[in-house]
Each structure stands twice: as structure tokens, then as C-alpha cells.
Amino acid sequence: MDRRGKHSLDGGESLLSLLHLHSESKSVQEEMESPWLSTPGSVIPRGGFFAITLLSLLLCTTFTSTKAYDALDPTGNITIKWDIISWTADGYIAVVTMYNFQQYRHIQAPGWILGWTWAKKEVIWNVMGGQTTEQGDCSRFKGNIPHCCKKDPTVVDLLPGTPYNQQIANCCTGGVLTSWAQDPEHAISSFQLSVGSAGTTNKTVKLPKNFTLKAPGPGYTCGPAKIVRPTKFITKDKRRTTQALMTWNVTCTYSQFLAQKTPTCCVSLSSFYNNTVVNCPTCTCGCQNKTEPGSCVDPDSPHLASVVSPPGKAINTPLVRCTSHMCPIRVHWHVKLQYKEYWRVKITITNFNYRMNYSQWNLVVQHPNFDNVTQVFSFNFKPLTPYVGLNDTGMLWGVKFYNDLLTSAGPLGNVQSELLFRKDKSAFTFDKGWAFPRRIYFNGDNCVMPPPDAYPWLPSASSKLVFSLLTAVLGTLACVLILLT
């Protein structure tokens, strides 16, 4: 239980105590009235009922978690490690490293933005592999001017192509971080700070506070910095180990509810055994008649090109195709074929955003038959097993230089693949929507599924129809044989 929850509980106990004292100090006239509240099968004191009601309301309103939790990636987070590697005359030099330990959530362009608040009057003399977005007021310095004098600096990564004398290891990717499952080597980003007006020993250094992480928008919540064991570094020849003088960690977790108010993707379904195509639920990501003018565009509009890239306007604002669901991304799951021992699914991801290319995209699908995947065509695949003994989740992403870029809306704004599953005779069925996914994530965001009662159902008479046809054929053959003999 977090600190706020503990305080809230203490407040609830105090409230109960006050209510109990109040009920004991009733006037004689109140006591003459009926002190009991009768309910079917029980008798409850009025004061106790009132206290229980207030306590229930108190618990419902105070136990609100500020941390994010993803059932498919329960340990996923971004960890920021702050290593002091040397002391200076008025402070220290530190290497700040960001590890994206999220299995399928990455940070794409324009990249991460990291901020914090200094505990004292620290300044940043120099930055390698990154830069602060603002210098702040450095008028109190004469001669050498610090790189940043703000109480609450924000740092961004440098762009690719930065001169080598301004780089350090794991820097200069424009703030782009891949997910840990896709490419752990590029899920790390670092920069180096020279901090002044700070402590020069482990006892005098004060930890920064109020860390914030934007990637590049909201969604991440960072906890306080915590001192941990100093990081150890191994030399390239692996013959010597050094360690940081002091290390602290900051953990940041993601919440889709904080990132955006509306969903960003939806799922549609179809199958070979039913002609019904279940589209994304209407108004999943917004409604055409309620959206702002110009937020969606008709693909047949003669002025489409000028609307997509208007002169003098920022082109990073979303502009989606006008659809019934108004989502930038739609994932279509089609149960394509079945064989004696296998069955096949086709997945199509369509981009309806005219101003967004999705680089290094990924898709996470939960289905009980992922423990028997035989082959995945034209996509990379990796099983995700967050829980021991449970293998029902798979991660898909594009092949590098082939389909790892999902281009903006248009004829080429889609990627597709097919999955071949081996049937598990103890569980496999097409009945009651079993062949459709339980959950789908695109780029780490949960996509809205159609309601289960709308799934393409297996016709109830299909098995009886096959049996009756087979019986009729056999009967006809028998009659022919009898006539011939």
C-alpha cells in the first residue's frame, strides 16, 4: 500500500472513532427513538450503519492507484539510472542512462523528453550526448556560462549525425527507443552531465526530485529517485571492473489513460464460415459529427493533398480518414482456412492517419492457441510469457527494410501477415467465437474489440448439415449399387 493509501486509511479510522463517540453521546431524546435500523434478516444500529456507509465511500474515493499496471507486461517500465563517475571542484560528472524494459511499448519520433527539479541550486555546466531545451537565467555567472541554470531543466536526445566529439555511447538517436523484445540493443539511451553548485561527496549530494518523462506526450508517471548499489562497469577487454561513485534509480511506468482520452486503435473480425464482417464499434475513437472541423478527411476528396500537408501548418497533428470508428489504426483478424490438423488466420493492420508513419510498429495478440504457432509469414514473432506456465500471448512486428514501416493512410498504408496454428484437439473449436483474439495491442495501446455477441458465430446447423449431406451421398451411392446389381 502506498503512503497516500496509508494516510487515507488512518483518516478512515479516525472518522470511525469520531462517529462512535458521537453515537455514544446522543441526547436522551435520541435514545428514546428507535436506535435500530431493521433490514430483512438483520438488525443494524443506526450509528453503525451510518459509519459503515461513510467508510465505504471513503475507501472508494481514497484508494486510487497512481501506478500503471499492464497484465501482459507486468514488470514493464522505463528505468533511469544516474551514475556519478567522478567528482569536480564544485560538483560531479554523471552518466544518465534510460532503459526501456517494456516488452512491446517503444518511444518513437520526436523522442523522449526528460525533466526533473534540482534539490539545491545546481547548474549544468556541460552536456554530452544530449541538450537542455532552455538555458534559463545565468546572469549570476561571469566568465564561464553554464549550459543550463534552470531549477527544473528538461533534456532531449541529440539527432543522428551529431559530431563525434559531442557523442557518448547509446546517444544521438533523436530520442527514439525500441521496445525490449524487439531490439534490446537499441532500447537504451544515455547522456552525460557535468553538474556544478552541488555536493562533492556521497553525503553532500542531494538527489533531484519530481522526475517527468514525456515520450513525447504524456502517459508516464515517474517515482522518486532511490539510492541503489553503485553500477559496475566492465572494460572492453573484460579484465577490469570499475564502479560508479554513487548511483540512484528512477522508475517510470506508462498508463494509456494518462496518454490520451480516447482509444487509438480498434479491431474488426471476419471468418470463412460466416459472411458477416464485424466492423469496429461505431465512434470507437470519436464521432464524425462531434469532431472538430478538419479532423477527418474523405479519401475521395479532390483537395486531399493540400489538406494533408497544409502550407504554414504543423503536419504532426493527426488527420484521419473519415470512418464510422474514427480510429487511426484498425487491426483486422480474419479466420481464413482450416485443415485437418491446422487452421490459418490473416492479420491486416491499416493506417487511417494521413499524417503519421509508424516506424518499428508492433502488435501484441492474446489467444489460447499461441502455444501452438507453427509458422508466421512476413512478420517477426516472439512469444510473450509474463506468467509461468501460460503461453497465450504473441508479439508480431515487421521485417526490417521490408514492412517495419507502416506508412500513412493510402493505398500502401497497410501491412499484413498470415499465421498458421496447429489444432489442439482438447480445446480447438470454431464455436462461440473461440477463434478470435481475446486482446490486441498496437504499439502498446489496447485496441477496442467488438462486443462478444457481435462475433461471427459458427452456424448452429453446420455440423448437422455436413452429416446430413454425407448421409445423403452415401444413401445415393448405396441405391446406385443396388440398381447395378
Image (tube, rainbow, N blue to C red):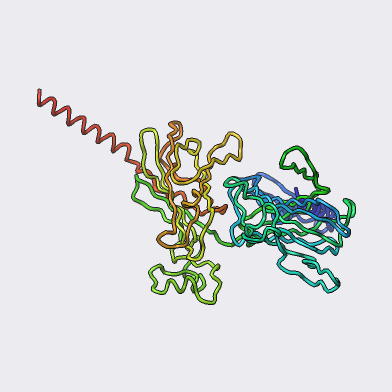
Does 392 sit above or below residue 413? above
Which residue occupies the foreground of this view, 56 or 320? 320
185 above or below 328?
above
Residue 117, position as x, y percentages in the image: 78, 62
Q: Residue furthest top?
A: 485
Image quarter hosting the C terminus: top left
Q: Is residue 85 left or right of residue 185?
A: right
Q: In the picture, residue 54 is in which quadrant?
A: bottom right
Residue at position x 77%, y 45% from top? 231
Lateral position of residue 157 relative to residue 409, left or right? right
In the rendered view, tell whether residue 237 sits above or below residue 278. above
- Residue 394 makes an appearance in the image: yes
Name the residue at 39% across, 72% down.
Answer: 301
The percent coordinates of residue 95 (x first, y second) are: 76, 53
Residue 67 visible in the snapshot: no
Instruction: Return the residue nearer the eye: 32 or 20.
Output: 20
Using the image as rendered, state which of residue 458 and residue 246 is in the foreground.
246
Q: Kindly identify the residue that appears in the image at 77 percent across and 39 percent down.
A: 240
Task: Classify residue 142 by image quadrant.
Answer: bottom right
Q: Is residue 384 left or right of residue 473?
A: right
Total labels: the figure holds: 0
Q: Picture coordinates of residue 458 (x, y %)?
A: 37, 43
Q: Measuring 43% from the left and 35% from the top, which residue is drawn there?
A: 422
Query: Residue farthest to the left?
Result: 484
Spot occupied by residue 402 in the image (x, y as percentages of width and height): 46, 51
